[in-house]
Amino acid sequence: MYRKSMSLVLLVVVSLVMSVFPVMAQDTYPDGKILIYSTGQPHFRELFYQPSIHRFAPNVDVETVQIETMHAGVQKIAMDNLAGAYKDMPDVIMLDAVGIMNLVDAGLLLDMTDYWTPIADQFVDGAVLDATIDGRVWALPDAVRPQVLFYNAAIFEEYDVDPAMMGTFDGYLEAGRLLKERSNGEVYLSYIDPTTYTWRYWGRRGLMPQANARIWDENGNVVIGEDEGTKLALGFLDQLHSEGLLYRTTMMQPPLYEATDQGKIATFYIGAFWDEFLRRNLTATVGDWRVMGAPVFEEVGTGGAPVSTYFCVVNKGDDTYVDLFLDMWYDFSTNTEERNAWVNEMDRLNGPYSNPVSLEVLSDPFWQEPSSFYGGQSFRKAEADGLFNPSPNMTVTPQDNEADGIISAEIEKYVAGEQTMVQAIANMDKELKLRIGRAEMP
């Protein structure tokens, strides 16, 4: 009787452990590698992944391949699948909501619902919101990052402009006017890009969700031309540009960083990811930068919309390393000691990293530590605070990749001076109706 009772206790203990550490099985895996597609600079992530995966399978490696865009990665997977080149397909790809929807429609992602559900309460609220379709979870969260406002505090001090006024977009506009006036036109509030980045960062990820703007109505009909939120969002961008408050330059290129270090660009209204680009490319203004939450439209009242990225397991007909990847993902997400050590290495290398999605890791004091780049302010804490009172992201449809191309083309003509913003919005509306017609609503 005693032995039976002890056996039952052991069984319960093992079950509890497995519920907390959902995979972690000591399986024997064949020699090989896990192939991961990712945008950005995935080689930095390998610095964590290689030792992590070797704790579970010493004979398996990780290879990360940089893709230019998530859409390009989706297209590559779809083409390889169509050609039957399954061995060329990655095991995992990093995607956003649009890419997830496209690959789910094609049957090329594995359903993660059963894996995610028992561990969901270990992670931040809304972690898989954009990865959930019809109640099923199709990807695992990597990052949930807010829209924030980076600003050069030294510039604001020099020209006696209070950064606190930038809590609203009206105040942000007024700050730009004061900086322009008091610097005799030498200082610009921010930037405007002649390529796709203006729509991506000012529009799709920035002003549009904060203004409750819409491309489609609830039935998938094109409404961008008559939508009041669109007029508010793009009208504000037009006002900044028409008043000469935006420095015209290409994002992520040396001239932008040179102008920023020279004190010509005072702020960046953009996602928290921009931190890595500032740290890596600025030298003269190190210590001058600060971060605050995104301004708000007073008539709407919500902050910046977060951008989430996810790791998706590709349905390639070979599940050899699926459990191993899940072990590695969980280790990266929840191993406080190893995650913090990796972040310290990223700081040393000026490499990219984001706040964790694990509640336990995020609660560690490490994630409130000050940063010398931000003059002693804790960027990590500022990023976490930026998730307060978020705006909902724009509705995503399978047609949004094509729609973004159409809309961006009209914004680019506007930036080039070939049309007004009113004309740009009208042309977006016309081209979307002509070339897409109607979107498939989720």
Image (cartoon, rainbow, N blue to C red):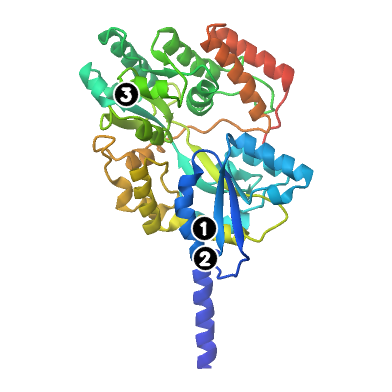
Asked if marks 2 and 1 touch (Cβ < 8 Å), the reply is yes
Percent x, y of residue 344: 34, 49
Asked if marks 3 and 1 touch (Cβ < 8 Å), the reply is no
From the viewer's perspective, is residue 334 above or below residue 212?
below
Circle 1 residues within 10 Å: few <14, some 14–19, many ≥20: many
Q: CA distance from mark 2 to mark 3?
A: 45 Å
Percent x, y of residue 248: 44, 14
Q: Of the two numbered discs 2 and 1 on the same chain, state the one appearing first in sequence.
A: 2
Task: Please name the amino acid that badge 3 sits on.
Answer: Asp
Q: Nearer the viewer, residue 55 or 202?
A: 55
The kind of secondary structure element at disc 3 is helix
Q: Quadrant of residue 262?
A: top left
Which residue is found at the position 47% from the left and 36% from the top?
306
Circle 3 residues within 10 Å: few <14, some 14–19, many ≥20: some
Q: Of the two numbered discs 3 and 1 on the same chain, state the one appearing first in sequence.
A: 3
Q: Quadrant of residue 383?
A: top left
Mark nearest the camera among 3 and 1 is 3
In the image, taking residue 281 as reference, residue 411 lies left or right, namely right
In the image, taking residue 166 as reference, residue 229 lies left or right, namely right
The kind of secondary structure element at disc 1 is helix
Regarding residue 224, the answer to whether it shows in the image is no
> Mark 1 = which residue?
328
From the viewer's perspective, is residue 69 above or below residue 110?
above
Which residue is found at the position 42% from the left and 48% from the top?
356
The label shown at residue 338 is none
The label shown at residue 56 is 2
> Mark 3 = which residue?
261
Which residue is found at the position 52% from the left and 76% from the top?
12
Percent x, y of residue 89: 68, 48
Task: Please name the amino acid that badge 1 sits on.
Answer: Met
